[in-house]
Image (tube, rainbow, N blue to C red):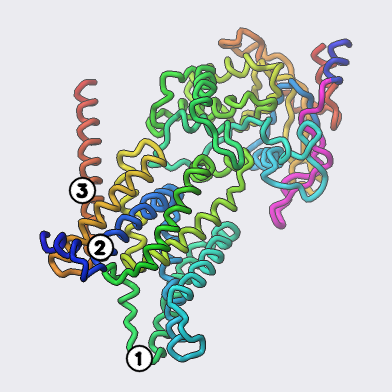
Amino acid sequence: MTDFFAALTNPSIPFVRNALIAAILSAILFGVLGAIVTVRRIAGLAGAISHAVLGGIGLALYLAATGLVPNLPPIAGAIVFAILAAAVIGLVSLKAKQREDTVINAIWAIGMSVGVLFMAKTPGYTDPSAYLFGNILLISTRDLVLLGILDVIVVILAWRFYYQIEASAFDEEYAKVRGIHTNLVFFIILAIVAIAVVLLQTFVGIVMVIAMLTLPSGTAGYTAKNLAGMMIGGGVYASLFSVSGLVAGWTFDLPVGAMVVVIAGAVFIIAALIRIIKRRNSVNSREVSV
Amino acid sequence: MSALIRHQQRPVALRFHDVFFSYGAVDVLESINFHFHEGDFIVLVGPNGAGKSTLLKLTLGLETPQRGSVSVFGKPPRDVLEIIGYVPQHIHYDSSFPISVSEVVGMGLLHPSSRRNKRKMQHTIEEALAKVDLIDLVDRSYSALSGGQRRRVLVARALVSDPRFLILDEPTANMDVESEQMLFKTLGSIKGTTTILVVTHDMEFVSSLTDRVLCLSNKGNKGQACTIVQHRTEPAYDVHAGFTQKEVLKVLHDTTLPGDDCLAQEVLHD
């Protein structure tokens, strides 16, 4: 562990410091968006968007490598595919509920397959797993700036429209009766989740973004009294998981993204077990008192 | 007759004019014509699947009729949502949703885009909870309440904005006797000052608070869609009046009053 802190203060290896800043900035997004995704039960939709992103990355890599669109960054393709996937999934979710799961899973699978095909045809060697599992140690200063900007936007929107978001998630019909444009709220949430997924996949990778959108907020949900508590608690848990995963990954020379998610998963399961035991004890004590 | 004139002079709270509605090829409502005035206590009855919830959705502006018009105090429903209080039959409630009773009631004060001042609202929220006798549970988690208490919280949510028009969908469903009595006491206290529309599938008996009964029944042209029929009511002397100490009304399903007439029932009761 001392190695990690020595590396953190070593000016010749700035990527460790960048990784730590990325972990904290990501935790804010994981906390706020994770709580919304969890209470709205749209983790499956976010999963489909995050996996469809691979199609955009593959397409951008192909176009850039073949010279059709020189210097096209993978993130550009990822953003386009994420927004398209969010729009299609949002429309299907609202209009064709009976086919919702089919379409969502189709977008999930087709997006990934398109990405793998483009990468296979891209000149030179491209490893899809680099995008699937991410590498926080490759985060650039530009990535940090983008994450910071998105953090500010998400926190301001969540504060400004907190009650509208809460009402839409808790009782959508009633929110409509109060004049809230719940479909617009839903689409904005999906669009922001889509953009966040693109930025966050650099940190933990496409596959694990969903785990980090659900596990910290799920853990916080066991003790949170309201949605705001879940957002803040989720952010605190996400930063703890991210930093400890980063330290452990660096110390034991293991993939950081996977390490973060394993820690998050372990804490979530332990919290769930504690809750079950507590509930059982309270039921037993009630029976005894009766 | 002076009471009738006064009644006529009150503004029309809800008017359905020749409304037709269908979900795709399935006709649900047709030739719906009725209106009632401000301050009326109206009960809408009908069997399950008759289209009661659809009629409510049209009243709340959640659906738009394919033909005809719906107006609330002379305006399209979406333009007057702030004066409507609504108690849904049930909410698709996620028991793991972390939310307090106070926050649920506060939703009744929500505006489409502005942030509300939580401290200013707290007093209003507590007043609404006092009306349904749940003031002690203001900080309790909503999921920790019993089914009857949750329904009372939803009633408080509808009352918190001091609505001019209160709509309740199956308000006594899954309610314990105590909660049911508390609800009728609350409704009795605002009867006359607030227009109240209660939707229920209970075809037999209607509370003593009721001014008129509207019935959705299969009398459409094609025999599929439902339309509104107004039945006579009469006191049900064989039924215990309960806590209201007033006579309970019985709906006479073999009698029908003329279409869009809000006076016929008044004449009968005079």
Name the residue carrying label 1.
A124
Q: Position of residue A6 (x, y in %)?
A: 14, 62
Q: Position of residue B163 (x, y in %)?
A: 65, 26
Name the residue carrying label 2.
A17
> On the picture, is A49 further left or further right than A241?
right
Mark 3 and mark 1: span between their CA atoms?
Answer: 45 Å
Question: Which circle marks residue A65 in the picture?
Answer: none
Name the residue carrying label 3.
A270
Q: SS of the residue at dot 3?
A: helix
Q: Position of residue A276 (x, y in %)?
A: 24, 41
What are the residue bounds of the magenta stretch?
B10-33
Is residue A83 one of those drawn in magenta? no
Does residue B46 lie above or below A286 as drawn?
A: below
Q: Amino acid at mark 2?
A: Arg
| Residue A110 visible in rendering | no
Mark 2 and mark 1: span between their CA atoms?
Answer: 31 Å
Does residue B39 lie above or below A139 as drawn?
A: above
How would you rate the neighbour count of disc 1 (Cα within 10 Å): few for under 14, some for 14-19, many for 20 or more? few
Mark 3 or 1, nearer chain start: 1
Mark 2 and mark 3: span between their CA atoms?
Answer: 30 Å
Q: SS of the residue at dot 2?
A: helix
| Residue A188 visible in rendering | yes
Cβ atoms at labels 3 and 1 below 8 Å apart: no
> On the picture, is A289 further left or further right than B78?
left
Specify the quadrant that holds the C terminus of chain A: top left
Q: Amino acid at mark 1?
A: Gly
Q: The numbered mark 3 sits on a residue in which chain?
A: A
- Residue found at x 80% / y 43%: B19
